Amino acid sequence: MTKLFNDVAYQVVRLSDNLFSTGGITPYFYKRGKVWKSTSALKLHFKYFIHRTFPYDNCNVVKSVRCGDKIITTTYDARKWMDNPE
């Protein structure tokens, strides 16, 4: 996972190859991808695709939370997360 800039970070990972989304209107997938710093930032990105083809059907949202020296990750199906974020 990419270095966290905040106590909470979100990334979108493609299940077929474990690559991360770059975000944007045409997301690409690389070993390092975009880190969204809040639920609302990722939700805004997903909102762009409401009336377009959703590029994250085969993806998960990975939430990383820093707790002291540990990082706790939780994974969500991207489509379900878009419909009902946390």
Image (spheres, helix red, strand yellow):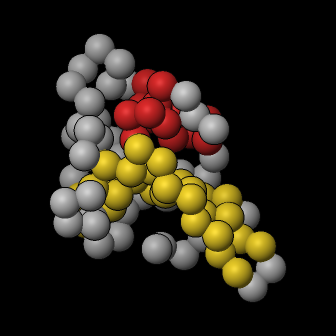
* Residue lying at 24% horizontally and 20% vertically, measured from the top left: 52
Name the outermost residue toward the bottom.
69
Question: Which quadrant holds residue 30?
Answer: bottom left
Number of numbered callouts drawn: 0
Residue 82 vs residue 22, the one in the foreground: 82
Name the outermost residue toward the right.
68
Q: Is residue 35 above or below residue 39?
A: below
Q: Position of residue 4 (x, y in %)?
A: 60, 70
Q: Is residue 77 above or below residue 82?
A: below
Left/right placement of residue 13 relative to residue 2 reads: left
Q: Position of residue 36 (x, y in %)?
A: 53, 51
* Residue lying at 72% horizontally and 64% vertically, measured from the top left: 7
Residue 19 vs residue 57, the one in the foreground: 57
Q: Position of residue 18 (x, y in %)?
A: 28, 66
* Residue lying at 63% horizontally and 38% vertically, measured from the top left: 86
Left/right placement of residue 65 relative to residue 3 reads: right
Residue 22 visible in rendering = no
* Residue lying at 61% horizontally and 53% vertically, measured from the top left: 37
Name the outermost residue toward the top.
51
Q: Is residue 51 above or below residue 81?
A: above
Residue 55 visible in rendering = yes
Left/right placement of residue 66 relative to residue 10 reads: right
Residue 60 vs residue 46, the one in the foreground: 60
